[in-house]
Image: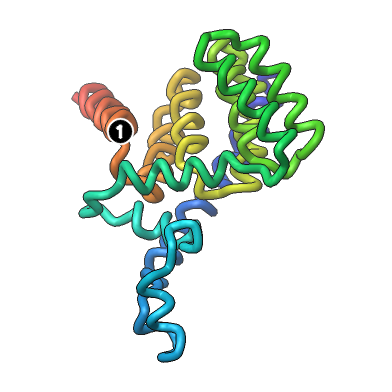
């Protein structure tokens, strides 16, 4: 189990680095504005409904440190990620989420496992099960599922934050900090993650004295 967790952490470290690179490139690209479109499409862009805005654009807006609408953007992104495209899978996923919210981790694992069996490409199924595993301290299985989430969605700020929490529990502060920073690169407004980085920095400073 220890060897498996080490291998998983090594692979996850590479995913964290890839996530940071991807986020940096997205930031350089900048937001898509009406002026970037052909003149015939600029009027359409100005009245584009929220549903038509690409998720990548929402993520770019969320990543702005001065973004005042981050709560709304976060909700929009999470809602999109939670849609599998199948009513049946969405129903199973909703059952898993309901079980999570009531602390029924084993039931949540069963529902999310069914989601994964039916649609292994749906990242939120893996993310939900990773959360359930974490709730009952099955850290190795949680790490393995986070790995699957980040393969499918490298900008999943929740999974990156969860990875940081597990690594912190495993007493791997530098790797935990890297995971937290990768999460903040996507979503810099997460108070709990900012607090976690500050906590690690304080611990590091104390150890250096």
Q: Position of residue 30 (x, y in %)?
A: 37, 70
Q: Position of residue 208 (x, y in %)?
A: 23, 27
Q: How is the image coloured?
A: rainbow
153 left or right, relative to 47: right
Q: Secondary structure at mark 1?
A: helix
Q: Quadrant of residue 57?
A: bottom left
Q: Position of residue 71 (x, y in %)?
A: 31, 41
Name the residue nearer the viewer: 70 or 169: 70
Q: Is residue 82 above or below residue 200?
A: below
Residue at position x 21%, y 22% in the image:
206
Q: Position of residue 145 (x, y in %)?
A: 65, 30
Q: Quadrant of residue 12?
A: top right
Name the residue nearer the viewer: 5 or 106: 106
129 left or right, relative to 183: right
Q: Quadrant of residue 183?
A: top left
User: Looking at the rendering, in which quadrant would you find the N terminus?
Assistant: top right
User: Looking at the rendering, in which quadrant would you find the C terminus?
Assistant: top left
Name the residue nearer the viewer: 202 or 83: 83
Q: Residues within 10 Å of mark 1 (few under 14, many from 20)?
A: many
Residue topped by disc 1: 197
Residue at position x 61%, y 36% in the image:
124
Residue at position x 38%, y 70% in the image:
47
Residue at position x 39%, y 59% in the image:
60
Q: Is residue 26 above or below residue 64?
A: below
12 left or right, relative to 187: right
């Amino acid at each position: 189990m220890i060897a498996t967790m080490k291998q998983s952490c090594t692979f996850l470290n590479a995913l964290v680095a890839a996530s940071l690179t991807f986020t940096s490139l997205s930031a350089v690209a900048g937001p898509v504005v009406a002026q970037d479109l052909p003149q015939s499409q600029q009027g359409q862009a100005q009245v584009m409904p929220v549903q038509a805005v690409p998720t990548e654009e929402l993520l770019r807006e969320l990543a702005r440190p001065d973004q005042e609408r981050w709560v709304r953007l976060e909700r929009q992104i999470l809602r999109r990620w939670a849609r599998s495209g199948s009513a049946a899978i969405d129903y199973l996923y909703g059952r898993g989420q309901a079980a999570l919210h009531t602390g029924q981790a084993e039931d949540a694992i069963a529902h999310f496992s069914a989601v994964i069996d039916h649609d292994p490409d749906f990242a939120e199924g893996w993310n939900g099960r990773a959360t359930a595993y974490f709730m009952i301290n099955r850290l190795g299985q949680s790490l393995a599922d986070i790995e699957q989430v980040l393969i499918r969605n490298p900008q999943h700020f929740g999974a990156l934050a969860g990875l940081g929490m597990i690594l912190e529990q495993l007493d791997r502060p530098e790797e935990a900090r890297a995971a937290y920073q990768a999460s903040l690169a996507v979503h810099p407004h997460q108070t709990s993650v900012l607090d976690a980085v500050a906590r690690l920095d304080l611990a590091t400073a104390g150890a250096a004295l």
